[in-house]
Image (spheres, coloured by chain):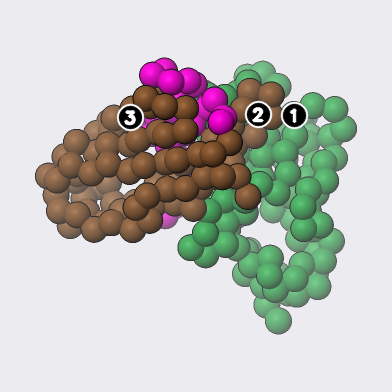
Chain colours: A brown, B green
């Protein structure tokens, strides 16, 4: 398995609360991604990073921000959580040569 | 914009029977195609991928997939399913090998009957 960890693995929070999810990799891969998974939608890309301090938006980026200050860490922040952000969040990593994404175990977030 | 369609939300197959999961994609250039499997409560595991070359690709766990450009399809097959194959299967397409992120289908839930 690719060395990807996500924390926390489960979180319950209240509407309006800020939330930060962390993705940590030990593979030194250049690219990192955040997806959300919802029933009937598959996985949808939120944001991605192609290097330290280099990030870009994905399909469903509204309400989310990201930061990458080190190669190994990619943070996803919900500035003010809403119930529509209740989801399972997956981090993924890849390398340009391999061009295959490997996924972390996921974080289950419930916004009440 | 690229897109992926998995026409079957659920498929039920008897153990030992053959399996085919359908995937159709829309992409303007040569696609990079992937199949992932997700067991309940787990992350996604890569089954196989197609970048170029031989259109029939072999993956893990006895799965294979065939790329058909004329039909814009990348169907997943297995000659004989096992109860442990019960899971959610996702087809995905990427540009430049997915460096900008993958576009996923909505998934097919595979049920195995004894």
Return the chain for callout 1: B
Tell me what residue is drawn at x 56 percent, y 31 percent.
A28
Q: Are marks 1 and 3 on the same chain?
A: no
What secondary structure is marked by label 1? loop
Callouts 1 and 2 close, C-beta under 8 Å: yes
Instruction: Mark 3 or mark 2: name the one nearer the start of the chain.
Output: 3
User: Which of the image's four quarters has the C terminus of chain B?
Assistant: bottom right
Residue B47 drawn at (x, y percent): 70, 49
Callouts 1 and 3 close, C-beta under 8 Å: no
- Which callout, 1 or 3, points to the residue nearer the camera? 3
Q: Which residues are magenta?
A: A28-54
What secondary structure is marked by label 3? strand
- Distance in Å between CA atoms under marks 3 and 2: 22 Å
Question: Is residue A61 something one can see in this rendering?
Answer: yes
Question: Is residue A23 positioned above or below B97 on the image?
Answer: below
Q: Are marks 1 and 2 on the same chain?
A: no
The residue carrying mark 1 is B51
The residue carrying mark 2 is A99
Q: Is-magenta flag for residue A53?
A: yes
């Amino acid at each position: 398995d690719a060395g990807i960890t996500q924390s926390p693995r489960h979180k319950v929070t209240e509407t309006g609360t800020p939330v930060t999810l962390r993705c940590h990799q030990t593979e030194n891969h250049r690219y990192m991604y955040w997806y959300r998974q919802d029933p009937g939608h598959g996985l949808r890309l939120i944001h991605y990073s192609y290097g330290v301090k280099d990030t870009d938006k994905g399909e469903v980026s509204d309400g989310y921000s990201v930061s990458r200050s080190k190669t190994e860490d990619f943070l996803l922040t919900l500035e003010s959580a809403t119930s529509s952000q209740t989801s399972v969040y997956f981090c993924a990593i890849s390398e340009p040569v391999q061009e295959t994404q490997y996924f972390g175990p996921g974080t289950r977030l419930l916004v009440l | 914009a690229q897109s992926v369609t998995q026409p079957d939300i659920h498929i039920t197959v008897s153990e030992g029977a053959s399996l085919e999961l359908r995937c159709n994609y829309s992409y303007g250039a040569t696609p990079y195609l992937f199949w992932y499997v997700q067991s309940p409560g787990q992350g996604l595991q890569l089954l196989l991928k197609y970048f170029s070359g031989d259109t029939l690709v072999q993956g893990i766990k006895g799965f294979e997939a065939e790329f058909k450009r004329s039909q814009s399809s990348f169907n997943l097959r297995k000659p004989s399913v096992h109860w442990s194959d019960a899971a959610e299967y996702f087809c995905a397409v990427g540009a430049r090998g997915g460096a900008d992120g993958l576009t996923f289908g909505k998934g097919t839930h595979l049920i195995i009957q004894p």
